[in-house]
Amino acid sequence: MLTEKELELENKAIVQKYKDLLRTSYQTLSEEDKSQIRLAFEVAVDAHQDQRRKSGEAYIFHPIAVAQIVAEEIGLDATSIIAALLHDVVEDSDYTLEYIEEHFGENVARIVNGLTKIAGLKKDMNNYSLQAENFRKMLLTLNEDVRVILIKIADRYHNMLTLESMRPDKREKIASETLYIYAPLAHRVGLYNIKTILEDLALKYTQPQVFEAIQSQIRSQADNNQEYIENFKGVIEDALKKEHIDFDVKGRMKSVHSIHRKMLNQNVSFDQIYDKFAVRIIYRAQPEEEKFLAWKIYSIITDYFTPNPVRLRDWITSPKSTGYEALHVTVMGPNRKWVEVQIRSERMHEIAEKGYAAHYKYKHGEQKDGGIDIWLNRLQEALENSNGNAVDFVEEFKLNLYSKEIFVFTPMGDLVSLPKDATPLDFAFYVHTEIGMKTRGARVNNKLVPLSTSLKSGDQVEIITSDNAKPTTAWLDYCKTAKALSKIRSSLNAEKKSVADEGKEILRRKLRTQKIKWNEETVNKLVNHFKLKTSQDLFYRVATGTITNGMIKSFASRYHNALISFFTSKLQRSNKSAEGAYADNELSTKLDLLVFGDEEERLDYTLSTECCKPIPGDEVFGFLTVNDGIKVHKKNCPNAVSLQSKFAYRIMKARWIDSTQEDFYADISISGIDKIGLVNSVTQVISDQMHVGMKSLQFSEKGGTFSGSIRVIVKNNETLQKLINKLKKINGVDRVIRT
């Protein structure tokens, strides 16, 4: 318990923090704004009056600090400051959202609702992690109001600044989560300073020894480094003053996390990192002169220091999707040390510091959408294409929106921003869904390339379309963007249902030849006989040849046996009730086989029994352990975030598949007498008549004869044999064998 004097001092400190909040706001506050902020402050004080943080200080210091970050460092408006003060009120007290809406308006209530954590989940939602659900809830609110995310970042930022008082295990969990989700998110909305501090703090608590080692090395060289930066700055300042440019120069060491990442990426020690320094030139200019002056400053710098041509980045001509604008050049400084120089105007600097808030401060009238607008549109698209699974949603969100960017050109010369490692298929779906669906091939820089090719900045991409083209399962491995993956999955599901319709007619004919009456009862018996869930499953497997003629004949012989038929009907009734949840028009999968990586290899593994206990069908990933080989965890495992953030290089993609629908490669050798149109006849049989996929095709001619080799993708041996028999019937073909 605090003494009366200590309480008095604490109350004075609270009031002082409140006054600082009003005084340091980035936005101009009206008297009405201040009145509402005062009311929010009083509500927060009342709601948290009996609460204390782990450090022992009054809990109210936390929402005030969050509001301070929102007001000063992020630069948001009065509504955001009020929401920041109230962000824990509904969760921690008897105050309701209805009360907040009544006293502070709909906008504040909506933001507070987005920030209020989900207390628990229903039993039928056990497959979703609570953390992922909360993050998803926040993002869905962001669809309406971006301030939700910005306040959440401020909340996490203050929690990280005061993390020392938490238990070590709690610190590590929060820090891992910060590194995995919130630091990249802060970067994406343009809050670079906050992002840098979050990364450093996360490294401090997840890998304290690494953090301390790098920091001690920076400290030991601090005097020399500072002297070096000052000398470098001196040369630049003298040169720019001669040109009468109005500017400021700031020099700094790069962050601990940034240096650590370079050490890992380049596999070198601290002493072998040569670009530890960054110098920032902030110049003042009219909007129409900004670009000209940036390149003038670049020209002056390169008169004194040799630039690295590979490390020139022009984000003034093509700003990042975060809204970031600057000219970056790395030059060889004194003593043969690399120094990164960032050149930006005062306006650019403010946008880099404040992100979203400054972006809209400088946006006027009908100005074209900038980077942040484009990013928000892309976010909305990701939200719309969400598949309902919270864990997958977070993964897809990270994949599409946290990745680095590349810039490619359309054939017309328009610039398109895509995530790093995006492929021509991603580009096609970005341009238009219909173009993506009809993609037959792609040219990059006028050269025909595979659809799986990773694009690079500066590539010119042209998509070749065909009315006969349609998505295949392989396309899912070629895409990186949520939009492309979502559209391909939808198309494949529709295709499966179409194949199932064909299978229905095939089955009807086969049963007729076996003298079995076609009705619902017969179909149900077949579904139970083959241990399937729905009639659609049955029809699909008949169409693809997974259920063969021999298997149908075996069923027919059992069907005609009255005794077995009796027992089958009993079994059918029990199974029918057990599987009543499945609709007959749905196509389900029997997930019984686990495959790893992009190549979907079968590898030895063990299921994690200590933490999440995955079962077939669960969303999973593989983790390469030091001693126990591959350990399979559920995506919503309590340890998932920690493993993925700290050991990303040991994470393996894994998924359950239906072994009855697995594809196999088969090689066919073909020969005969050559004639015009023969290759076309062969491909027509394979693709149009048999609906079999081709992996490779090679033909050669010699002395009027031909020979060729074909690699096809089939479901089973029966399909392969049917294909071989059809190929033998082509005019001119003499010999077809499986090799």
Image: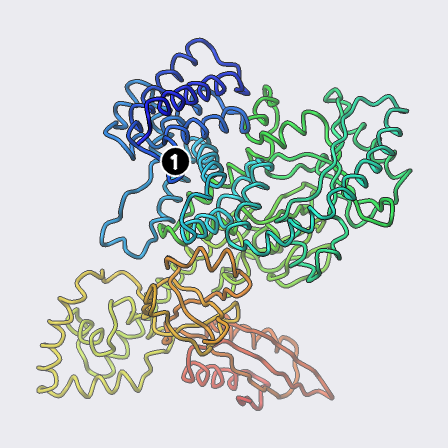
Q: Is residue 527 above or below residue 513?
A: above
Give the residue drawn at x 71%, y 56%.
270
Q: Quadrant of the N terminus?
A: top left
Quick one: 402 or 571, which is closer to the camera?
Answer: 402
**Mark 1 secondary-structure assignment:** helix
Residue designated by label 1: 141
Rendering coords of residue 290 (x, y %)? 75, 26
x and y percentages locating residue 92 in the rendered image: 29, 34
Q: Residue furthest top?
A: 31
Q: State which quarter of the image contains the C terminus.
A: bottom right
Q: Quadrant of residue 566?
A: bottom left
In the image, what residue occupies the spot 21% across and 79% down?
Answer: 529
Residue 236: horizontal and vertical position, in percent?
A: 85, 33
Q: Position of residue 218 (x, y in %)?
A: 69, 48
Residue 698 appears in the rendering: yes
Q: Is residue 698 above or below residue 173?
A: below
